[in-house]
Amino acid sequence: MDELAKSSGKVYLIGAGPGDPKLLTLKAAEAIRASDVIVYDYLVNPEVLAHSRRNAELIDASKRSGHPSISQAEINHLLIERARQGQIVARLKGGDPFVFGRGGEEAEALVDAGIEWEVIPGVSSGVAAAAYACIPLTHRGYSSSVAFITGHDAREGNRQSVDWSSAAHSADTLVIFMCAESIRRIARELVIAGRPESTPLAIIRWRTYQHQEVYSGKLEDLIAMDEHDQGIFEIAPPAIAIVGEVAALASKLNWFGQDELRHSLGSPKLAAAAISD
């Protein structure tokens, strides 16, 4: 990658993959090795940072609910200023930077500032979570369409960021990102919109890691928990949910193993226990 050696500054928006460091692309690893500054999010596996040079500056730009964090505007400013100083900057994001990674916002800021930049795609967390949970997102017998949806409720006034009445029927398979704090409400919204209560779903935590957890059941299981558990049942992030008939294939196609980390949402024992880090 000869262009990385040029003296002028440049920013690489890099998809660091879903978690398993072996899913990092060759091009991403090469760009990381060539960078002066590494700006990374909290979902980036620390083993990915090992590709950086010894003298590279590592900057944690994590944004987590309930924790002090750097704002998006501050991140944009940081990328621009470091590039203007002639540095090569690797901006690492979990999954793919252009799939709920705010890579588009950062790219716009770089273009507006006249900064040279490039995007290096990564393995999307939604796709990888499904694969490692043994759920095919498409299947000729069950699903011919997929929708990627955010579960993060970025409200504008009294309006939700996602119209669940439309999203419920937008595709056979729904992949819902950032849904740990909202999945039970979303399950209710989907049923209200006409999705059958018997629709299978799976919730995947820590996708592609050895300690990945998969919680399988139906929409009605989450709704029942929400009505009866008085808030006992909680799901801690990071989590991705997959809703659709394909989710029922997880146990049949299980190649990843880890049976002890697979749970049924309909289990009475689970309904009385918290899911936490």
Image (cartoon, grey):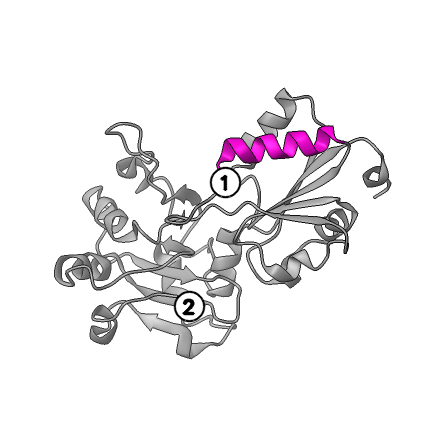
Q: Residues within 10 Å of mark 1 (few under 14, many from 20)?
A: few
Look at the picture and state if 77 lies above or below 263: above
Q: Quadrant of the N terminus?
A: top right
Residue 77: say if magenta.
yes
Residue 131: say if magenta.
no
Where residue 135 sits in the image (x, y, percent)? 45, 61
Instruction: Tell me the tag on residue 130.
Output: none
Residue 24 occupies quadrant: bottom right
Query: Quick one: 253 or 19, which is closer to the camera?
Result: 19
| Point 26% across, 37% down: residue | 165
| Point 35% across, 36% down: residue | 154
Query: Quick one: 105 or 175, which is closer to the camera?
Result: 105
Please indicate, yes or no, whether residue 181 appears anywhere in the rendered image.
yes
| Point 66% across, 30% down: residue | 81
Horizontal relation, residue 69 to residue 232: left or right: right
Where residue 113 sits in the image (x, y, percent)? 65, 22
Task: Kindly identify which residue carries mark 1.
Answer: 70
Q: Nearer the viewer, mark 2 or mark 1?
A: 1
Task: Kindly identify which residue carries mark 2.
Answer: 213
Indicate which disc, 2 or 1, sits on the residue closer to the N terminus.
Answer: 1
Residue type of the residue flagged with mark 2: Glu
Where residue 142 sits in the image (x, y, percent)? 39, 55
Q: Residue furthest bottom?
A: 260
Residue type of the residue flagged with mark 1: Ile
> What range of the chain is rendered magenta?
70-85
Q: Quadrant of the C terminus?
A: bottom left
Q: Residues within 10 Å of mark 2 (few under 14, many from 20)?
A: many
Query: Quick one: 256 or 72, which is closer to the camera?
Result: 72
